[in-house]
Image (tube, grey):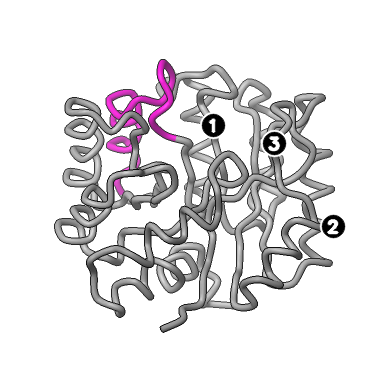
Amino acid sequence: MSFPIFDIHCLFGDSLFEKSESAASMQTRRDQYPELEALLIPAKPKDYLYPGAMEELRVATKSLAATFPCLRVDPWRSKEAEELIEQSREPAVFLHPFEEHMYPTHKNFYSVVEHAAKKKRPVIIASGYLPYSHAAQILPLIRDFPEHPFILTHGAQINICGLHITEAFEIFESCPNTYFETSGIYRQDYIERAVSELGAKRVLFGSGGPHYDFHYELKRILYLNVSDSDRHLILYKNARRVLGLDLE
C-alpha cells in the first residue's frame, strides 16, 4: 500500500555545514516519490544571514511543485527576527538552539516564540542537541506557551538512552500542545510508544535530510507496527493539519 508523504523537516540551500538539499536533489526525490510534499527549511547559511536565505528559498519553492518554505530566524538578531515573523506568510517558524548557540530560556528566544504565537505559526524546535536543546531545557518554554503548537524534532532527544528518553517523553505527556517529529530515531519502539500513548495525531514524519537519509527515515515509518490509518496520519495528514495547509 502506498501513502502520500509530507516531509516536515528538510534543510535546503547552501549550508555553512556543507550538507543541504538543492532544487535538483528535491526534484530527483519527487521523481522517485511523486506524492511527496515537503516543508523546506533554510540550512544555516555561510554568511549567517537568514533574510537572503529566505528569499532564495521562496524562489525555489515557487519552481518546485508541492514544496512549502519554512521561516527560519536568528534569535540573536531579535529585531530582524521579529520583523521577519511579522512580514512572513510561511506556515511555521524554525529555531535551532544548537546552531544559534542560544538556550531556549533566553529572553530573545522567548520573544521570537511570542511573535510566532501572535501570528499563529507553529514553532519547530531542533531538539535533543546538548548542551542547548536537551528536553529539560525546552520544557519551561513549552509550559509558558501552553496554547501554542510546538513540533520537536527527533522526538525531543537524540541519544536514545534512559534519562534522555524519560525527560523527552515528559514533555509530550505533560504538554498536549507538542508534536513528536520522527527523524533520527533508530528505535522503532520509541516511535511506536509515541503513537500508542500520545495518539497518532501527534506524530509527524520528518526526514531530517540531508543529515539523515530520506529513504531510511521513510522506512522507519513504513515498518512501524501501527495501523495503516495511523501511518497515513503520521506520513501526511498530520503535517498538513498542523501547518494549516488544509485550510487553504
Q: Is residue 143 magenta?
A: yes
- Kind of residue at disc 2: Val
Q: Residue at 76% of width from left, 65% of height from top? A: 27
Q: What element carries label 3?
A: loop
The label number, if any, that marks residue 96 in the structure image: 1
Q: In this view, does 17 lie to the left or right of 141?
A: right
Q: Is mark 1 on a helix, strand or loop?
A: loop
| Labelled pair 2, 1 in contact (Cβ < 8 Å) | no
Closer to the N terminus: mark 2 or mark 3? 3
Query: Residue at label 2?
Result: 59
Q: Residue at 38% of width from left, 57% of height from top? A: 220
The label number, if any, that marks residue 19 in the structure image: 3
Q: What stretch is highlighted in magenta?
A: 127-146
Q: Looking at the figure, which quarter contains the N terminus?
A: bottom left
Mark-to-mark CA distance, 3 and 1: 16 Å
Sort mark 3 into few (<14), some (14-19) or many (20+) by Cα contacts within 10 Å: some
- Kind of residue at disc 1: His
**Vertical placement of residue 107 versus 120, above or below:** above
Q: Position of residue 104 (x, y in %)?
A: 43, 25
